[in-house]
Image (spheres, rainbow, N blue to C red):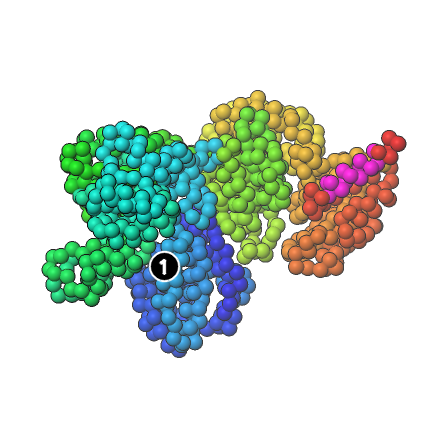
Amino acid sequence: MKIVEIKILRGPNYWSIRRPKLIQMKLDLEELEQLPTNKIDGFSERIQTLMPSLYEHRCSEDGPGGFFLRVKDGTWMGHVIEHIALEIQTLAGMECGFGRTRGTGNEGEYFVVFDYMEEDAGVYAARAAVRIAQALVDAKEYDIDEDIQNLWEIREDTRLGPSTGSIVEEAVKRGIPFIRLNKQSLVQLGYGVHQKRIRATIASTTSTIAVDIAGDKEETKNLLDAAQIPVPKGTVVRNEEGLKDAIDRYGYPLVIKPIDGNHGKGNTTNITTWEQAVKALEAAQKYGRSVIVEKFITGYDFRVLVINYKFICAALRTPASIVGDGEHTIQWLIDETNKDPRRGYGHEKVLTQITIDQFTQKMLDEKNYTLETVPAKDERVLLKPTANLSTGGTSTDVTDEMHPVNIFMAERIARIIGLDICGIDIMAPDLKVPVTENGGAILEVNAAPGFRMHVEPAEGLARNAAEPVIDMLFPKGSTGRIPIIAITGTNGKTTTTRLTAHICKAAGKKVGYTTSDGVYIQNQLMMKGDCTGPVSAKFVLSDPTVDFAVLESARGGILKSGLAYDKCDVAIVTNVTADHMGLGGINTLEQMARVKSVVPETVKKEGFAILNAEDDLVYKMKEDLDCNIALFSMNEDNPRIKQHCKKGGYACVYENGYVTICKGTWKIRVSKVTDIPITFGGKAVHNIMNTLPSVLATYLFRDISIEDIRSGLCTFEPSAALTPGRLNMFEFKKCKFLADFAHNPAGLELLGNFVSKLDGSPKIGIISGTGDRRDEDIRELGRLSAKYFDEIIIRCDKNLRGRTAEEIVHLLVEGINEAKTKNIPVEIIYKEEDAIMHAYNNAKQGTLITIMCDVVSEALDFIKNLKAKEDALLIS
């Protein structure tokens, strides 16, 4: 068997709306298609031996052991691989349980779909599951522990840290969307103009100068000292001479640390000799020439968290240590401590494994201990100089022990430094007594303080440190979202998207929108090309100037990666017709409708799905939607429209020459069709159809008025600037060119219908077929061309998509010959520019030339340049 491809789905998708994070692996079973598991000798026993934890997989049976029963009775290898991929992720600390295995339509080929927590781990699990299954088939030994360890490491390398992760989780609970902006901890919360950013626990609201001050320990100490906050006495030194002066001034014991260090790096505490001091200076200067030497304050290490200048919680931090039993060595005691199930790799669990490093060796050397020393019973041996959780330390919640004076002091410190998310390190006997009275002192003030010690303390009450961060960034009731209108369907998407965005702009919105020809921010083209997928949508939603998004969401992006947004306010489905059939495992119109239905299924409960009442597959989507429904139709007497409006529903129809909104039994006539430029005086019926959902979608927003809609409709011209590749008309001396992006039979039928209503003779069609479409679809383009054109020029796209030019031409000619009822001259000119020039040079007076564009921008530029040359010749 072999992996054909792996896709990472990151948003609502064909397989699931509620589980956006899925791996979709296309797997060719090859000869194993003929070998279900009960036909492979010993397979059932081998998989139970290698992965006994799969017993918990119920599969379609009633209880544990269900999957093993399916394997024993016989199931296909794709199904087995799905379960292996889920289980090895779970064994690596990533609980995953959703999976599907379905045929692609090709014999022996399957989509194996399963969820993931971290996408790199998901991809690894897909490949590893195939390796494991193959080893089981071949009865070969396999080291599954290596895969699980690799997955652990991938998880720790790629997932958000515990602090950032807790903030993101809290945001999600509040319905606030997020976008991860890099592979580290930079995250956007919210969309467009309402977005906020966090990096670890620094927010976009955090003062830069405050972070700078907190990063300079000496500057921090000076500010606090000036404000009568107790701090250790100390100074900054750069060499041994300065170190000697500091020792003479403050005496032992001392602390030496980098001036701008963090996480305890380079820190040495409780220094009592010159030799220790020199070594400590050397260790600190690895992080910078200037180091702080200050009096060592005895007591316990506390961390106090202040958010939005309000005290939130406090924790006692204890350095990594072991307690002797009088019988076992330090190494044995460390190993036993690490067996605590709460300890794990990196940040994966509440506590971190204790490792032996140079700091551990140094602390043991100072006590004349080695790892083989047997400490006395109840003797605590410290293994790290600082109490950081990341080095194996523990935390105990002491929030309820904070004296009111200490709370006041902590909130005041945050104000003095100016940090809205502030971690304060205090050394004191306890926090039950004011620090000013028990000899304690403030050691440091930290920007980006870690939350793990508070969110998951080893002892005491867990505190939701993330909640006040979200409350600060997004006051109660705010979700950080901007309005989103999402548009999908087979034909008409781009025109509907552009018109909708134009109306919103007329209403004063700062619109970002995506189309099949580019991404636009407030009508400025930002990205060229087919931009109807999740990357382009994410681009718009990440833009801080956008307050309204209109997103064309096409089949390809949904199948490749899912949607970029989890929810939208309004979804429009224009239609479902035969296009792109046979691609991506979509072989029927019903499957295509399922792809398109992903978009309306993301509509908020209070939002609207706007459906084409004339399209059975689109209309049927309403059965699975949990939102309001609105309909549109070219026929006001459509029974579905009448029934819907009778119940008080919203609709938009074409009636008596008007675009009309129906609110229950009431009608609002928005505009005469003849006053809407893109309808060409009502001749472009398909553009009347495209206008209806645009009008309805914008009307549903209370801050967009009927006057705004009328203004948008009347100013939306069918030009190469506003609607590139959509009925763009160019008038030449002898002929007219009509450029359009029609690329499938339904689109060409609509275009041909429009052309038939236009003056101009003869009518010449420059047509092409798309190589990755079915033979029948390409032939149908030929048949329709014979129906609507007097002469035909066949050209070819630059990208033939898997076919030869000759194959495509042959299929088009077959279709033309099948349908023609008169003699139709057919010329074959492969290059688009050559085809255009041939039509232009041979045009008779009054000729109408219609071209199905390949790359819209290039075709339009060529025609415009041709027009400019003709105009220049006429002037001269």
Residue bounds of the magenta highlight: 859-871
Q: Which residue is mark 1?
A: 152
- The image position of residue 576, as x and y in percent, is 57, 45
- The image position of residue 44, as x and y in percent, is 36, 72
Query: Callout 1, which amino acid?
Result: Trp
Closest to the observer: 92 or 723?
92
- The image position of residue 82, as x and y in percent, is 42, 62
> Residue sitting at 61 percent across and 50 percent down?
578
Residue 99 showing in the rendered view: no
Report how many numbered discs are placed on residues in the image.
1
Vertical arrangement, residue 483 with respect to residue 91, above or below: above
Looking at the rendered structure, the secondary structure element under dot 1 is helix
Vertical arrangement, residue 158 with respect to residue 612, above or below: below
> Residue sitting at 73 percent across and 58 percent down?
805
730 sits left or right of 617 in the view: right
Q: Is residue 550 magenta?
A: no
Quarter of the image where one finds residue 479: top left
- The image position of residue 686, as x and y in percent, is 65, 37
Quarter of the image where one finds residue 399: top left
Quarter of the image where one finds residue 373: bottom left
Q: Main secondary structure of the magenta part?
A: helix
Closest to the observer: 539 or 138?
539
Closest to the observer: 716 or 755?
716
Where's the C terminus, which quadrant?
top right
Vertical arrangement, residue 790 with respect to residue 210, above or below: below
> Residue sitting at 37 percent across and 70 percent down?
143
Label 1: how many Cα within 10 Å (few below 14, some 14–19, many 20+)? many
> Residue sitting at 52 percent across and 45 percent down?
534
Residue 285 showing in the rendered view: yes
